[in-house]
Image (spheres, rainbow, N blue to C red):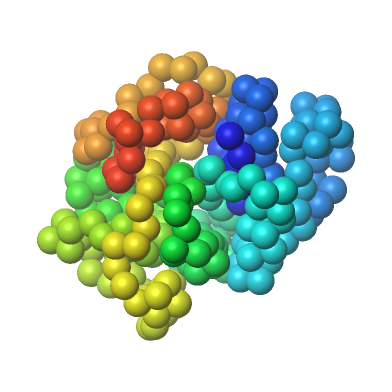
Amino acid sequence: MKVLAIGASRNIGYFTALKLLKAGNTVVFQLRNISAFDSDAEIKPFVKSGQAKLVKGDALVEDDVRTAWTEANADGLPVDVVLLSVGGTPKFTVSKGFVINPPNLCTTSLLNLLSIIPHDLPTQPRIVAVTSNGVTADSHKNIPCLAKGFYSLISVPHADKLGMEKVIHWSAGWSEDSWKDGAPEPHILPQGWEERLGGKAGWLKSIVVVRPAILTDGEEAAKYKAGEDIPGLWTVSRKDVAHFISNDVLSNWSKWEGKAVSVGY
């Protein structure tokens, strides 16, 4: 299996990619800093052997994403999976809680990816997109009451994740009746974005949205809940989200395809 990993220099994307490499898969990383793994004893052997390939580029730049896609397919073997796990480093502000820069980081990265994948491929790649639990109105209802105070502090990053979810909802042709969140803010999802993606809803055939609970740096326990509309999820380690993606989502694609899946404890 060949995987194009965008936003995988650290955290969920990194841990997922490492698991996939250890399982014998090929991973093409798009990296802003091509030296990101120079001191990484676990990744370096895979780079040396050619099992991991590094492509310089920024997910915020459409041409860079196109280059990564082209490079990933250059050997004539098509990309099987695209893992999109882009995320910024939040900074706390008194007035807005946690913020990221730019505020539309994840939505723009997704739009760039979907705009460069040809719609007429005989077989589209499977896409795994990481957003967050509690982003949509329906998933927010399932958050424990005592956790909602923290979620109010991450409303700015969540506005970006909501933009991602809206793009996916439209592109995958999911029922409009199931979208209850209105239009994302214009600075997150500008007018005309549908035309960038061909103007026709429902073209995206194979995607899973992964919605982690509040993320921690804990170790992998391989014990968590995963499914649609699961109430009461508090936290989840990044390593367990990686376990879910690599060991369950990609191994049981027909079970999860076309779903937005919450994961946590």
| Residue 109 placement, left or right of 154 | right
State the image coordinates of residue 72 (x, y, percent, origin top left): 67, 51
| Residue 190 placement, left or right of 254 | right
Q: Can residue 237 be seen from the camera position used here? A: no
Query: What is the quadrant of residue 109 in the picture?
Result: bottom right
Name the residue located 25 percent from the left edge and 48 percent from the top edge.
Answer: 140
189 up-or-down from 67: above or below: below
State the image coordinates of residue 6 (x, y, percent, origin top left): 61, 51
Q: Can residue 67 be seen from the camera position used here? A: yes
| Residue 196 placement, left or right of 259 | right
109 up-or-down from 186: above or below: above
167 up-or-down from 238: above or below: below
Question: Dividing the image into 4 quarters, which one contains the C terminus?
Answer: top left
29, 7: nearer the viewer: 29
Query: What is the quadrant of residue 162 in the picture?
Result: bottom left
Name the residue located 56 percent from the left edge and 38 percent from the top edge.
Answer: 12
63, 184: nearer the viewer: 63
Name the residue located 54 percent from the left edge and 47 percent from the top edge.
Answer: 82
